[in-house]
Image (spheres, coloured by chain):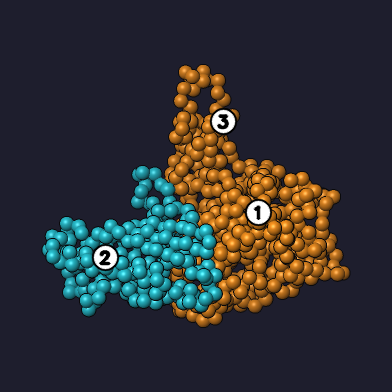
Amino acid sequence: MESEQIRELVDIPNGVASRSIFVDEELYRQELKQIFGRGWLMVGHESQVPEPDDFMLSRMGEESVILTRDRQGELHVLLNSCRHRGMKVCRFDKGNTRLFTCPYHAWSYTTDGSLVERAGDLFGVPGWKTHYHEALDKKEWGLISVAQMRNYKGTIWATWDIDAPPLEEYLGSFKLWLDSALNSRSGEEGGSTVLVGVQKWRVKCNWKFAPTNFIGDAAHAVSHKSVNLANISPSGSGRRDQRAKGHYAFGWPDLGHGGLGFTPRPEEEWEQGSVFGRFPEVSEYFREVFEKRKVERAGETHYQGKGTIFPNTSFHEDQPRTIIVHHPNGPEETEFWRYYLVDADAPEFVKDTLRHYFMTYSGPGGMTEQDDLENWLYASDASKGMIARQFPYNYQQGLGYSEPFDGYPGSVWCGYRETEQNQLIFLKRWSEFMQGWNWDELMHRSTHPDYVPFPLKAGENVEEVR
Amino acid sequence: MSMASTDRVGVEEALRLQFEIEQLYAREAHLLDERRFEQWLDLFADDFMFRVPIAQNVAFNALEEEYLEDALAISWIHDDKPTMAKRVEQIRTGVHWAEEPLSRTVHLVSNVLIDVVESDDDGPLELDVKSGVLSYRHRLTDQEDTVVGRRHDRLRRIDDVWLISGRTLYISQTVYLGSSFSHFI
């Protein structure tokens, strides 16, 4: 589809977007190239490959990739496809090796720096002397590596695009919220780890339903009435989760990220809600941790929030504390990977209580997430028809009421939670990637002629958002 | 019925146990499939734990790591009895959209193999029971999925009534293909 047609799919000033974005096969193929071929994607967590030669399989979009640690301790992300005939060189979800040998014709690749120059280089080819006459250049035929990889506080990110900006620049000040998930409750930098076990499951829905839900769709809370009625909260009463005051939707119009979070405030003024009433020991543990935090972090600013990092990673910083990656698996299917975070130094009984709560909330067995999955599945299903797809989705909640928010540079808010500004921000970014803008244009170092400023409340200056 | 049990309790007792436990499983399947969830909960001991560990593909020499069963490993489901009761309660609200309208399920239980748990004290008779379970569901118009798994149960007899006191269900899928576990597998 030409960029002119793509531009027409998302009408930012009017807050509407075409359903074909969520069902069209051709657009999906373009997404794999323009979005999943360029954006920063989360691959895994360093704790999943702790030892030299440890590896695990992951995905980047539809591609199978290997995350592995070499003998020198360096991490690598390699495309899991033999350069000879494309067979997967690895079909174990995890293991320990420095030699990936293709089952088809036994081309073998190694990550051992003492044998090859670059991790993933071709090492052994049967008949290299006798049948290839030493003419095959092994250095040219190593496993494809990602263009850039970044270990951010234990989470591993990669992109296929060498021109993509560094991950921190790509995140902008939204990084502060990712920090709130990855730092420990006491505020220690990157003090979290993931529990062993990633829930992976498929749902017949377009991949974009999940990130645009997790980007801060506060109005969908009604979907979860049943779980509130049944009351799964570890507090023993009230909502399924509980949180501090001052919780709003913030979006980053020039970057495509957003979520629900808190206005920044001095650490000593942060009031953490008590949510583990049914588990007094856990309650006491968290009370001590947050008391300590107040003292040790006094004078610092408390930033906290949850949301979506464009394009397909969402996280929750508090309850349940998780990261979910929405892997596209065809225009009508998504493969979700859910990771669960805990403080690495938390006592075992705290981790165990959290893990039980996480599993009853999230994932395919999660009493909250199940109703989300149902929404996404049947919204996809009912948007496919040739009649249905002619009518756009509506994103007008709060439209024209967004204002720049100085506490998070580059962000906007409406001063409340129930706004669809963030979904629109995601779709704006989607459109910019899909139109094939270059990175100077995507990062707003230069202005693309088709740049459409995000609609703000009358009188607000768009330049203030930058 | 394994030889060990036959040796220990004698053929007659072994046949009686086999009959009782197979009847119990048939009753459980019918209670679930007839949506008599509250009665289904009565089959479980108060300290019951239900775990569905995640499977992953591993090499032949690492098969002990195929299912993630460490104490702190994430599972598909790891419920105590009160949590299971919450799931029933949620379905009964009538607004749990993933199960409203309710899925139609059929559970088939087979390959029942019983071992008597050896015990030195005078506690209740306990059994380790392995079985195979096929849990089929149909939902709305064209949503259909099947979970097949190996079940390892612990059963306890109190006042001549069998209670299920523990269950681990080893499902075959590494990537779960059935959207959600909103139904009871």
Quadrant in which the C terminus of chain A appears: bottom right
Instruction: Give the drawing colour for chain B.
Output: cyan
What amino acid type is highlighted by mark number 2? Glu
Nearer to us of marks 3 and 2 is: 2
Q: Which residue is mark 3?
A: A141
Residue A335 rendering spot, x and y as whole percentages: 55, 54
Chain letter of the residue beneath label 2 in the structure image: B
Secondary structure, mark 1, is helix
Q: Quadrant of residue A269?
A: bottom right
The answer to whether A211 is drawn above or below residue B42 in the figure is above
Q: Please check whether the numbered discs 3 and 1 fall on a single chain.
A: yes
Residue B82 rendering spot, x and y as whole percentages: 41, 76
Question: Is residue A251 rendered to the left or right of residue A102?
Answer: right
Residue in the image at 21% along x and 71% along y: B125
Residue A23's disc number: 1
Instruction: Give the drawing colour for chain A.
Output: orange
Question: Is residue A33 rendered to the left or right of residue A69?
Answer: right
Residue in the image at 17% along x and 61% along y: B5
**Nearest to N terminus: mark 3 or mark 1:** 1
Mark 3 → mark 2, Cα distance in angstroms: 59 Å
Residue in the image at 44% along x and 74% along y: B88
